């Protein structure tokens, strides 16, 4: 069974940094691209960043480029999202997901609250 | 970015009746590899999303046969042949053909 477990969420002031991690199990991790998708409570879903199977290709949406960095460690079956210069509008539940074009598994999410 | 527009945004349905959700994109979703990366997700209250349909019409393992997807190009539909109480929740379409992947606003299905 595919399992994706996020950690590292929390409350942070604007301008601060957080690092989210995702522990993956139940599948061959380096066979898959991975992404982070966020959801604002009561609102919709927004794909944030994605990375291919070996980390050689990675991309993020414009609103977080230069602030967020996605990375992976295939030896540890882990996916990370380093978030710097956080803004109030980055407040959301951040899901670790398997896939890029065709997301097929979701973690429960790590809550991130950016507030002064 | 590709804009995905769902309708209706609210869908009250009687148990046992059919339901249909439309998803339209402002760009053609046929990829250069010939596939159409249009997915449907269900999000039950308090849960993470779960994929129901991938590449327009392929049902994921374990998804009841009452769920079906259809469409092409820019116009897609998710159909539920007979709604059950457990189908309550939010439904999202998502395109993965163009970068970045984008989602529809979501359709809230509720039981009348």
Image (spheres, rainbow, N blue to C red):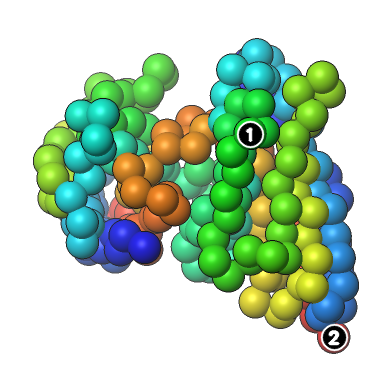
Helix, strand or loop under label 1: loop
Q: Position of residue B78 (x, y in %)?
A: 22, 42
Quadrant where the N terminus of chain B sits is: bottom left
Q: Position of residue A114 (x, y in %)?
A: 78, 74
Left or right: residue B62 compared with residue B111: right
Q: Do callouts 2 and 1 mark residues in contact (Cβ within 8 Å)?
A: no
Which labelled disc corresponds to residue B29? none
Nearest the camera: B7 or B18? B7
Which labelled disc corresponds to residue A116? 2
Q: Position of residue A104 (x, y in %)?
A: 48, 31
Where does label 1 land, which residue? A56
Determine which quarter of the picture holds residue A18: bottom right
Q: Earlier in the sequence, mark 2 or mark 1?
A: 1
Helix, strand or loop under label 2: loop
10 Å neighbourhood of mark 1: few (<14), some, or many (≥20)?
Answer: few
Residue occupying image coordinates x 37% and y 23%: B60
Residue occupying image coordinates x 79% and y 29%: A73
């Amino acid at each position: 069974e595919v399992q994706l477990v996020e950690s590292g969420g929390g409350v942070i002031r604007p301008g601060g940094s957080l690092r989210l991690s995702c522990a993956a199990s139940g599948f061959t991790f380096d066979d898959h691209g991975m992404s982070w998708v966020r959801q604002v409570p009561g609102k919709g879903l927004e794909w944030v960043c994605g990375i291919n199977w070996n980390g050689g290709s990675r991309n993020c949406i414009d609103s977080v480029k230069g602030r967020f960095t996605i990375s992976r460690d295939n030896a540890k079956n882990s996916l990370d999202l380093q978030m710097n210069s956080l803004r109030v509008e980055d407040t959301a539940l951040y899901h670790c997901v398997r896939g890029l074009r065709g997301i097929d598994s979701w973690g429960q999410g790590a809550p991130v609250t950016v507030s002064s | 970015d590709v804009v995905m527009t769902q309708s209706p945004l609210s869908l009250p349905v009687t148990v046992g009746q059919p339901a249909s959700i439309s998803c339209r994109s402002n760009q053609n979703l046929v990829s250069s590899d010939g596939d159409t990366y249009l997915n449907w997700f269900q999000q039950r209250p308090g849960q993470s999303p779960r994929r129901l349909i991938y590449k327009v019409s392929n049902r994921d393992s374990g998804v009841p046969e009452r769920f079906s997807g259809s469409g092409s190009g820019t116009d897609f539909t998710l159909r539920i042949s007979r709604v059950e109480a457990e189908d309550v929740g939010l439904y999202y379409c998502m395109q993965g053909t163009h970068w970045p992947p984008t989602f529809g606003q979501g359709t809230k299905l509720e039981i009348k």
